[in-house]
Each structure stands twice: as structure tokens, then as C-alpha cells.
Amino acid sequence: MGNTENEMLEKRFLNLMRTYTDDETYIAECWKEIYASYTGKSRYYHNLGHLNNMISELNEIESSVTELDTILFSIYYHDIVYKSTETDNEYQSAKLFEKRISNTHFPKIQNCYKQIEATKEHKTSVDKDTNILLDLDLSILGKDKSEYQEYCSNIRKEYSIYPDSMYHPGRKKALNHLLELDVIFKTDYFFDKYEEKARKNMAFELSQLN
């Protein structure tokens, strides 16, 4: 991701925070933490590029969102904790979000907390905004083949501590979990845009895993 995109990502977060606190030092600290987390040396996919893609996709359907600031906070914090060896990253990310944003006047902390936790199972929610967040998170699955293959490669790098004999079964399980969902994309917009392509991409990836 280029410097301009980094700057746009930072600017949007700073402006978001300024709606709920005038403590510029604290705002800067929160961004510094987000930046450091998403640029960690083990972040090949779950990085600032992932956030930028989600924001870019969000811009296309912003008018459909009920609580825009909530979904923005969810985007910035949903993968702030990410360790390939752990299974509770979403919970830890939600807890860290709650800890940081509790120091502001943002009134929808619990809504956002639930949205972040929902990115673990990706089950259809009764909340429309949560479904939008989940679709944003998975939008990479429906991209062109070359971009999808780059995503696969980057995910593999994040799990590089595991040999193929361990990685392949785990990856197959994750892919099958998504393929067995009634719908991968919960909103009509993203279903029409990405569902068919995403299923083809994942089916191809599965065929390549021994």
C-alpha cells in the first residue's frame, strides 16, 4: 500500500476519533498503536492493505450503512490483535478496542464490540451493519484470480511456522466452513458482486491443497 493510501487511512481515523475526543495526544497514540499492529513483520495479509481495501469497498455502499462511525471503528480494530498461533484474536481485538475507545465519548462501544467478535464465525447477523462489515472483511475472496492468489500466498506466509502437513488441513477446514455457509456474502450488493467468483476461487484453492 502506498504512502498516499496510508495517509488517507490515518486521516480518516484521526477525524473519526476527533468526533468523540479532543485529546490530540491520545488520538495520536491510538493511531500509532493501530499502525504498529498492522505493519508488524508477520503481517502479510492482515495489514494496512486489508484495511484500505475494506474502506475502499465501504465507500461504494456508505449510504447503506446505519451507523457509519461504528463500522469504521470495527474496521480499524477488528484485526488489531492477530497471531496465527491463537484462536481468540477477534475477542482480544474487541477487548483492546473497548479499552481504548472507552476513553472517548463514542456511545456505541458495545455495538462495535459485537461486530468485531462477529468476524470470527462470519455468520449472518440480524444487524444489517454487521453483515456489511462481514462482507467487507471477505471481499478479497471475490477478487480476480491473480489478486486472490496473492492473498492465498500472503495467508500462507502468516502461517509459515506450520509445515504443509499441518497448514493444508487447517486451511481446508477454513475454506470448507465458508463454502458450507448458505451465503458467503450477506448483503445483496456484495452477493451480486462477489459470491460466484468467491466460490470459484476457493474451490480452485481447495483443489491445489494436497
Image: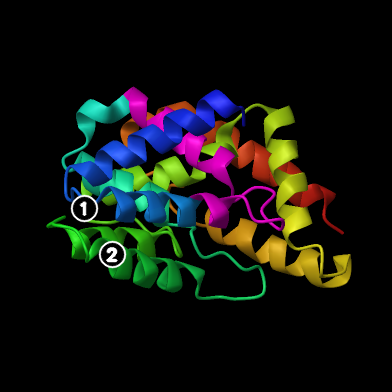
46 to 194, vertically: above or below: below
- Mark 2 to mark 1 CA distance (whole Å): 10 Å
- Horizontal and vertical percent position of residue 85: 67, 74
112 to 8, vertically: above or below: below
- Horizontal and vertical percent position of residue 50: 55, 42
Q: Which residue is mark 1?
A: 127
Label 1: how many Cα within 10 Å (few below 14, some 14–19, many 20+): few
Q: Is residue 23 left or right of residue 80?
A: left
**Local secondary structure at mark 1:** loop
Q: Which residue is mark 2?
A: 114
Q: Residue 96 lies in what quarter of the image?
A: bottom left
**Local secondary structure at mark 2:** helix
Which one is in front in this view, the residue at disc 2 or the one at disc 1? 2
Q: Which residues are magenta?
A: 35-60
What is the quadrant of the N terminus in the image?
top right
Residue at (16% x, 55% y) in the render: 106
Q: Residue 121 lies in what quarter of the image?
A: bottom left
Residue at (59% x, 41% y) in the render: 199
Label 2: how many Cα within 10 Å (few below 14, some 14–19, many 20+): some
What mark, if any, has residue 155 been given in the picture?
A: none
Task: Judge by depth and name the residue closer to the eye, 89 or 96.
Answer: 96
Which kind of residue does numbered mark 2 sit on?
Lys
What is the quadrant of the C terminus in the image?
bottom right
On whether residue 53 falls in the magenta region, the answer is: yes
The answer to which of marks 2 and 1 sits earlier in the sequence is 2
